[in-house]
Image (cartoon, rainbow, N blue to C red):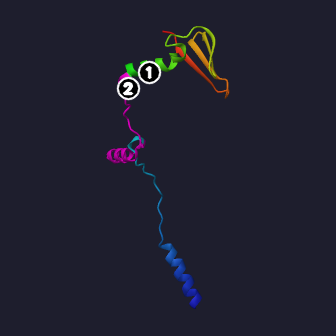
Amino acid sequence: MKTTFILLFLISATSYCAGQQLVYTPKNPAFGGDPFNYTWLLNSANAQNQFNDDFPGLDGLGDFDSLLQNQLFSPFNNEPPEVGTTREGDLEYEVYESTEGLVINILNIQTGEQSQIIIPNE
């Protein structure tokens, strides 16, 4: 009698349990979430951002262009490089014209590291 009562109780208790389907709702408005979450997400990302957007010494693209030219042409006495191969210290420069533009291959003789710079035709 006792076991029947317990069995009947367990069967009746489980029949009252109901489940529902899980539904995913995105938080980010870029992926279909609530547009009111945008401000919260942006403020949260800005609070966690450790990087600074200021670049001291660079004033727009003009300064960036001059900085890039100084970096590129400093081994060549700030003149555009001549076609051919040159060696300066541990670096070997190979300069040649191609259909893409002026190509500069830079080889570090000590470490074997290589870089290639392509200056496009205008």
The image shows residue 103 at horizontal and vertical percentages of 58, 14
Question: Label for residue 67?
Answer: 1
Mark 2–mark 1 contact, CB under 8 Å? yes
Question: Label for residue 106?
Answer: none
The image shows residue 87 at horizontal and vertical percentages of 63, 16
Q: Start and end of the magenta stretch?
A: 31-60
In the picture shown, does residue 41 fall above or below 63?
below
The image shows residue 17 at horizontal and vertical percentages of 48, 71
- Indicate the amino acid at tag 2: Leu
Q: Is residue 84 magenta?
A: no
Measure the alpha-carbon separation of dots 2 and 1: 9 Å
- Indicate the amino acid at tag 1: Leu
Between 73 and 39, the one lying in front of the other is 73
Question: Label for residue 58?
Answer: 2
Rate crowding at label 2 as few (under 14), some (14 to 19) or many (20 or more) other CA atoms within 10 Å: few
Q: Earlier in the sequence, mark 2 or mark 1?
A: 2
Query: Where, quadrant-wise, is the N terminus in this rendering?
Result: bottom right
Rate crowding at label 1 as few (under 14), some (14 to 19) or many (20 or more) other CA atoms within 10 Å: few
Element type at mark 1: helix
Residue located at (37% from left, 30% from top): 56
